[in-house]
Amino acid sequence: MATPSAARGAWTSRTGFIFAAAGSAIGLGNIWRFPYTAGESGGGAFVLIYLLCVVLIGIPVLFAELAIGRSTEKNPVGAFKKIVPGSMWPVLGGLGIATGFGILAFYSVIAGWTLSYLFKAVTGGFGQAMTADESAALFTQLTGDPVWAIILAGVFILLTIFVVQGGVSGGIERTTKILMPVLLVILVILAIRSVTLPNGMAGVEYLFKPDFSKVNIQVFMQALGQALFSLSLGMGAMITYGSYLPKSENMPVAGVSVAFFDTIIALLAGLIIFPAIFSVGGETSGGPGLVFVVLPSIFNSLPAGNLFAVAFYFLLAIAALTSTISLLEVCVSYFVDEKEWSRQKAAWLLGGICFAIAIPSALSQGGSEFFTSFVGGLDFLSIQNIIWGNFSLSIGALLLCIFVAWKWGVPKAIESLEESGDSLPAKGLWSFLIRFVCPVAVGVILIFIIVTQQYF
Ligand code: TRP
């Protein structure tokens, strides 16, 4: 089997790659961000636009990133340097690395909340009746404590550093292979329970019945940002992961499988959260705390609910970890490849800086008044989420499409995607999407947002 240089590490097989890439894609984006964004953007219409974004923009951009990664076997900056030396394009890779950093700095805070819920579950905190108000109070108690919020985000970053400094193929592949399927099973059980709660079907309807009166440019921006965020696109994570994929593997199949599983998990999360909201009573627009506040009511209504809670928060933490690994890995791979730092040095130093940047987000849920109501009534974490998760990823994806379509060229990209000898199905379609549909759609959304100034 032809493998990229051993020093950089490589996946041992295609399933290894699928699990690692799926591990990056599947995370808090699916289970925390998707339901909360859908709830803020009016439900069904958002979901429909989101699905269109996944198919028409997400999958084509995913292919583009994988093609660049496989062809260059480099980190995002090195990849652009290799293809067009001496140009400005490596700046785009640099933007990606900064974005990874920005995302990791707020993502680890939410991951920290998962740990505190896990701890609560382990000590038997779920499975008995809890009113919606009690659950909201618990959320405030767990996430509003400034010291704990900072410590737990730090713990999560530490876990990420430990895995990343060990290199890509061992840790990530093994954990995801076993644990992701278990997560899927638990989600299915929770979704069945939630949908069958009294009035649960109202939540299903909310999720799948589009109400177009709710659609505005914001909804498009949210859906686009969510599609990119959920598939780990727009910042070069998939360039980096694609660079570890053995040349012999069928990349298009791997890419589509990842997108498929990622979408299924997000929809399952929606099927867990919204029926429960409609059954127990609560606001669909509950903001970043939505999932954490709603879930306890489902655990209450299950036999052995606390056990489910333990399993769920544990697996969610693992899913978040396989995502934070990919975020840190992109930054680390840049400093290892381009600056010749050791993996250890890069992982610890970058992880440490990221922890410092995470502190304001950790304080933004009540820990500090200043960060809780930061700009326009929004908390610091929500603002980071919008800046990095929506804008930066969209700009990254737009420039990436332009690069592949008009600079590197579609034929070269296709050659890279077909390197294993398997031909790329629907080549013409992909080429059309990446040259016209993706850049125009993303560009138009961004321009509209700028013109109307509806940033948040
Ligand atoms: N996709 C992950 C999630 O849904 C988050 C993530 C990991 C990510 N790596 C990324 C998002 C790179 C954007 C870019 O939870």
Image (tube, rainbow, N blue to C red):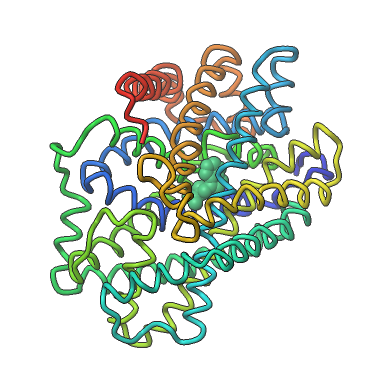
Q: Is residue 254 visible?
A: no
Residue at 29% from the left image edge and 85% from the top image edge: 129
How many numbered marks does the figure carry? 0
Give the x, y percent position of residue 398.
48, 23
Camera-nearest residue between 98 and 134: 134
Q: As displayed, is residue 127 above or below residue 143?
A: below
Point out the residue furthest to the front here.
Answer: 369
Question: Which residue is drawn at the image coordinates 35% and 33% (left, top)?
Answer: 221
Q: Check the image and report above or below for 417 versus 206.
A: above
Left or right of residue 22: residue 429:
left
Image quarter in which the N terminus is found:
top right
* Quarter holding residue 452: top left
Q: Is residue 189 left or right of residue 317?
A: left
Q: Is residue 324 above or below residue 453?
A: below
In this view of the protein, which residue sits in the foreground, 265 or 372? 372
Quadrant showing the C terminus = top left
Viewer-proximal residue, 169 or 396?
Answer: 396
Is residue 111 visible to the viewer in this orientation of the structure? yes
Report x, y in % for residue 160.
67, 57
Q: Position of residue 245 (x, y in %)?
A: 67, 42
Apparent side of residue 201 relative to residue 377 in the rendered image (left or right): left
Kindly identify the residue that appears in the image at 82 percent across and 48 percent down.
Answer: 343
- Residue 285 locus on image (x, y percent): 26, 53
